Amino acid sequence: MNTRYSNNGDKLETFYREKFEDYSCEPFPDAFEKINKNLSSETSIFSKINQNIIDKFGANRILTSLQVSLLVNFITIAFLFYSYVGQKETAASNEMMKEQNIISEDVQTLSNPKEVESSKKSTDIKPMDKKETSVIANKKENNFKPNNNSHVGITKEELKKTLIPTEEEHKGTAKVFKIDSIGPILNSNPIEPAKKENYKDNLEDFYNQHAEKLKDSTKQLFIKKK
Amino acid sequence: MTKNSNINIQEVIKGCLLNNEKARKQFYEYFASKVMSICRRYTYSKYEADDIFQESFINIFKGLKTFDEEKGAIEGWIYSVTVNAALKSIKKNYSEKYKTIEEANELNMGSVNLNDSLTANELLKFIDELPIGKKTIFNLYVIEGYTHKEIAEMLKITEGTSKSQLAKAKEILVQIHNKHYLIDEHKVFK
């Protein structure tokens, strides 16, 4: 042993010290092999894992270095595959997010169509009925022919032009109305309804006025039929 | 240590530094039993000792390049590495709290009957009856020869605690010793 003892003359201490001076005890049989393995495999982490497996599970489950390397390779490949799949999943999830955004926009459109239309000029293709199409078509035409005189699109002059036939037209067609001739018709007084108390007198007057005319006309009809 | 006493330890160390397996084997055989005895003293069973032994030798071979022969003999360095491994294991496996024992008194050695026929193995059994803290301090101070100051630094305790723990350990050992001695006397009388 070393020579660093403080010789304090303690009987018990000296006794124990002397007894243990030459004391030695043998280590377990394969201790060196284990130590050596541990040291030589220090550089290889895989061998270290192997050693740990041996230490933990005993001789029955010892893996050969080939098995360990295969295991490690498998783990590496699995890890790489996992990372590759992870990347793909991320890409897929991004796509999903985009799609979800689109769907949510559509849902928003369905729930609040006005808001959405006002918020963005819709590029959606919406089926339209004939009326709408014709209205849009007219609007478009009007848009191409802007008219400052009237918001309706036709001025009074134009209306006159269309309604009042030219001289040539007038000669050819007798059915064309002049705009001036419509006015008196529209403005003429309608027949006032007869008052109840005067009804009988009115009827008599009406009969007296037209009786002869009716007699003549019925006579004429009778003659024509014959 | 006695197995290959003819070997040149300097050459063996050089071989170990070059990762020569044969040299490593020689080095191991030269120091193994001594290292194992240290490990055994700090533990309660051979299994615990085996773990510390393996750990110690790995540390020794790994740290051999740091050994400076000008600072001291290789044996002292090896024992220090082993003791450190043992203390590390104790710290890991036991939660011993070193308390300063006020009532520990100086032993009256006149009443101690030391049976000289007792072997180291028998004494080891006595030491095993000590609690881990007292056992560690007893080993460090009495067998390894560390001072109370050094022990205090190693175990992060005060010198007073180290002294009182040692005194209590010795008291217990004397009791055990006397008990054993009386039993032996009975055997003699019978």
Image (spheres, coloured by chain):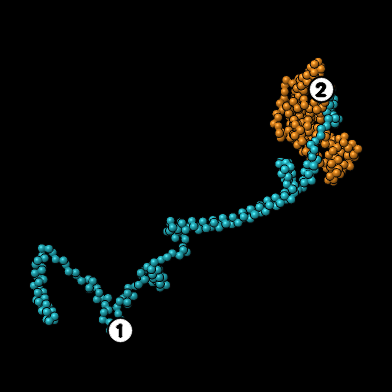
Residue B110, compared with residue B156, is above or below; it is above
Q: Which of marks 1 and 2 is nearer the N terminus?
A: 2
Which residue in the protein does label 2 denote?
A: A12
Which residue in the protein does label 1 denote?
A: A168
Q: Colour of chain B?
A: orange
Residue at image coords 71%, 51%: A70
Residue B90, compared with residue A170, is above or below; it is above
Residue at image coords 88%, 37%: B4
Give the residue type that dot 2 points to.
Leu
Give the residue type that dot 1 points to.
Glu
Q: Chain A is drawn in which colour?
A: cyan
Quadrant placement of the N terminus of chain A: top right
Residue at image coords 28%, 83%: A172
Residue at image coords 42%, 59%: A114
- Near mark 2 (Cα within 10 A), the count class, few <14, some 14-19 or many ≥20, is some
- Quick one: which residue is furthest to the right in this view? B6
Q: In this view, does A224 lie to the left or right of B33?
A: left
Check the residue under mark 1 and report the chain it is in. A
Give the alpha-carbon distance from disc 1 to disc 2, as whole Å: 153 Å
Residue nearer the viewer, A154 or B53: B53
Residue nearer the viewer, A191 or B164: B164
Of tags 1 and 2, the one toward the viewer is 2
Residue A34, compared with residue A88, is above or below; it is above
Residue B135 drawn at (x, y percent): 76, 27
Count numbered badges in the picture.
2
The answer to whether residue B185 is visible is no
Secondary structure of the residue carrying tag 2 is helix
Residue A136, compared with residue B78, is above or below; it is below
Check the residue under mark 2 and report the chain it is in. A
Secondary structure of the residue carrying tag 1 is helix
